[in-house]
Image: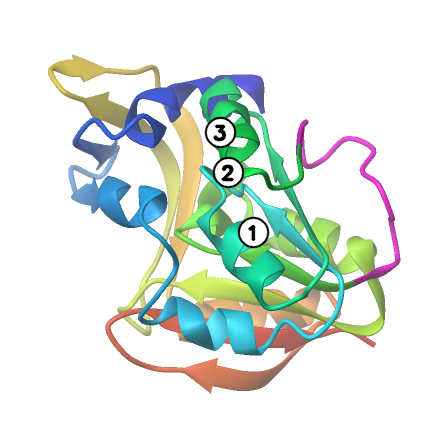
Amino acid sequence: MTAVAEAFDGPLSGTPSRLLCDDGTEVALDVDRWSDPAGGCDDWLLRHCTGPTLDLGCGPGRLLVALAARGVAALGVDGSAVSRTHCRRRGVSMIHADLYGPLPGEHSWSHVLLADGNIGIGGDPAALLARAARLLVAGGTVLVEADPRPEHAWRGTARVVCGARAGEPLPWAVQGAVPLAVTAGRAGLRVTDVHLGTRVFLELTGP
């Protein structure tokens, strides 16, 4: 996952960027929101984190800061050195690691976050949700952001276009709430809450 993390270093530094998918579609990356304090729809995610929380693909750490302010123990995971620098400056805990590698507290986290399109990491949402499920304590939840188009599903490669430079093709995926619910079931997770709005979130509960 190192190549994926490095591809997002530019956007994580605040440079206007977009994803160019191999089907020809383009997705603007909300780099300002990633760096700003958590707020707006983020509050739904934060309210659902009532115990130790692992933020996969934590980026600059805005959700970690907000969780700490609420007294919730949280740890971020990100392969980007830029993210690590931001998190250190903000005084929040994160580890510079591959989310598929060994992580602290396997099987003990109350919640796992996959926000800001991170369900696309690696191009295999089923494998990613199965990985997240293995990190949870019994009955824990995965809080995941879905594409706002409810039926949309795409899987292929995408380039991160940062300024005038396009990176190498990376495996990526997008899923709306409907296909994501099916994918979650295959990972042993069930939908227990949904937020529908400008941004869409699902709460997925493990056995």
Q: Position of residue 119 (x, y in %)?
A: 49, 51
> Is there a contact, CB below 8 Å, between mark 1 and mark 2?
yes
Whole-Å distance between the Cαs marked 2 and 3? Answer: 11 Å
**Badge 2: few (under 14), some or many (20 or more) residues near its Cα, within 10 Å?**
some
Q: Earlier in the sequence, mark 1 or mark 3?
A: 1
Which quadrant of the figure has residue 157? top left
Determine the secondary structure under disc 1.
helix
Residue marked by disc 2: 90
Determine the secondary structure under disc 2.
helix
Residue at point 81%, 55% (across, down) = 134
142 left or right, relative to 4: right
50 left or right, relative to 14: right
Q: Amino acid at mark 2?
A: Arg
- The nearer-to-camera label among 1 and 2 is 2
Q: Amino acid at mark 3?
A: Ser
Which quadrant of the figure has residue 206? bottom right
> Is there a contact, CB below 8 Å, between mark 1 and mark 3?
no
45 left or right, relative to 50: left
Residue at point 61%, 58% (across, down) = 68
- Extent of the magenta region: 95-109
Q: Which mark is residue 83?
A: 3
Q: Which mark is residue 64?
A: 1
Q: Find out whether residue 108 is within the magenta segment.
A: yes
- Relative to 176, say whether 166 is above or below: above
